Image: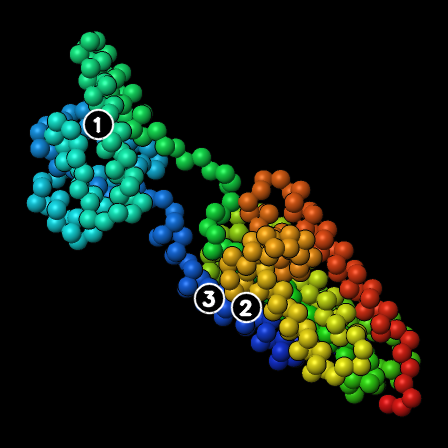
Amino acid sequence: MFLHHLKYDILSGLRSKEFLIWLLLFPIILGVFFKTAFGGIYDSDIKFSSIKTAIVETEENAVLHQVISSMSEAEHPLLDAEFTDEEKAMEMLRSGDVNGVIFAGEKLTLTVSERDIPETILTSFVEQYNIRQQIITEAVQRSPQNYEAVISALSDEVNSCREIPLTEGNTDYMIQYFYNLIAMVALYGSMTGLHIAITNQGNLSALGARKCCSPAPKSIAITASIVSSILLQTLCMVVCVTFLHFCLKVDFGSQLPLVYAASIMGGILGVCLGFFIGSIGNLSEGVKTGLALAVSMISCFLSGLMIGDMKPIVAKKAPWFNDINPAAVISDSLYCLNIYSDHKRFLVKITTMLVMSLIFAVLGFILTRRKKYADL
C-alpha cells in the first residue's frame, strides 16, 4: 500500500507544471543570469594580477634589470614589466596598456595617469627601491666582493609581499549569490511540502476528500507523500548543483559530494517547512501558497540573495536570527565547506537543518492527524 501511494505521488509530482517551472527551469535561468552578471567581477576587479609597467632607462641600470628578472621568477610577480623607450612608454600609458611608467636614472621616478590601487603599489615599489638602493650602494662601496649577495637582498626586500592564502577554497565573494540560489531552490521545496497537506485534508481539495474516504491509513498516505516529495526535491537539488558546477563552472571547492549532501538536506528542510505551513488551520490553498512563498522569499532576502551584505547586517542587529533562518543555515553550510578545512561548523549547520526538519514534520503530522469532517 505504501509503495502504491509512493508511486502515484511521484508521478503526480512529475506532471506538475509548478514543479517543472519553479524547481527546475527557474533556478537554471536565474543561475545563468547570476553567472552573466557576477562571473567576471572577482577576476577583473578584486583578484590581484601583476601590475603592467613600462620601464624607460635614461641611463643603464644593471641593478634594476637584475631586480626585475628576479621578481619575474615568482609565481605571481608584482610587476609585469617591459623595458622600452620613452615615446612608446608614454603612448602605452595614455592608451591604458600600462598602469605606470618608471624612469630609471640615478634614481627611479614614476609617471602615472591616475591614482588607484595599482598606481599606489607602484609608488611604494619605487620608494622602497630608491631607499634600499642608496643603502646597498654604500654597502657595495665598502665591500665590492658582496655585490651578488647585496643585489639578491635588494630583490628580496623590494618583492617582500607574498601571497599567503587563508583558505584553499574559492575566495570569490560573489559565490554567496550562488549559495543563496541553492538555498532558494531548497526552500521552494515548500511548494511540494505544501501539496502534501493540501491533498490530505478533505476540506481543502477534492483529492484530499477522496483520500479521507479511503480505507488506507492516513499516516501511510502522508508518509508516502513526504517521501515522494523528498525524492523529487532531491532530484531538483542534484540538477541545480550539477548545472551550476559543471555547466556554469561555479567553483564550490574541493568537497563537491558534501555540497550535494548539504543541498539535499536543505531540500528536505524546505519540504518539511511547506508541510508544516500547509497543515496550519483551514486557510485556502491560495493563502497557504502565498504564505509559503512569502516565508521562503523573506528568508532568502535576509540571507543575502538580493543584497549581498544583508546577512552581515542581520548578524549585527540580531546575531541569533541567522542561526534559525532556513536560507541562512543552508547557505552557511555551503560556505563552511568552501572556507574552513575542518567540518565542525558544517556539521553544526547540517544538525540544525535536521532538527528544524524534524520539528516541522512532527508539527505537520500533529496538525493533520485525526481530522473529521461533517460532510465532504
The N terminus lies in quadrant: bottom right
Q: Amino acid at mark 2?
A: Pro
Tell me the residue that label 1 is attached to: 130
Residue matched to label 3: 32
- Res. 161 image quadrant: top left
Q: Nearer the viewer, mark 1 or mark 3?
A: 1
* Residue 271 image position (x, y, % from top left): 71, 67
- Residue 355 appears in the rendering: yes
Secondary element under disc 2, as helix, strand or loop, is: helix
Mark 1 vs mark 2: give the one in front: 1
Residue 266 placed where, x, y %? 66, 60
- Horizontally, residue 44 falls left or right of residue 302, namely left
Identify the residue at image location x=84%, y=72%: 367
Gap between marks 1 and 3 measured at Cα: 50 Å
Instruction: Give the labeled residue for mark 2.
Output: 27
Q: Is residue 261 above or below residue 20?
A: above
* Foreground residue among 174 and 76: 174
Count of marks placed on residues: 3
The answer to whether 304 is drawn above or below residue 364 in the figure is: above
Q: Earlier in the sequence, mark 3 or mark 2?
A: 2
- Compare marks 1 and 3 and give the one earlier in the sequence: 3
Q: Is residue 76 above or below residue 145?
A: below
Label 1 to label 2, Cα distance in Å? 55 Å
Q: Amino acid at mark 3?
A: Val
Q: In this image, 249 relative to 49: left or right?
A: right
Q: Earlier in the sequence, mark 1 or mark 2?
A: 2
Q: Quadrant of residue 153?
A: top left
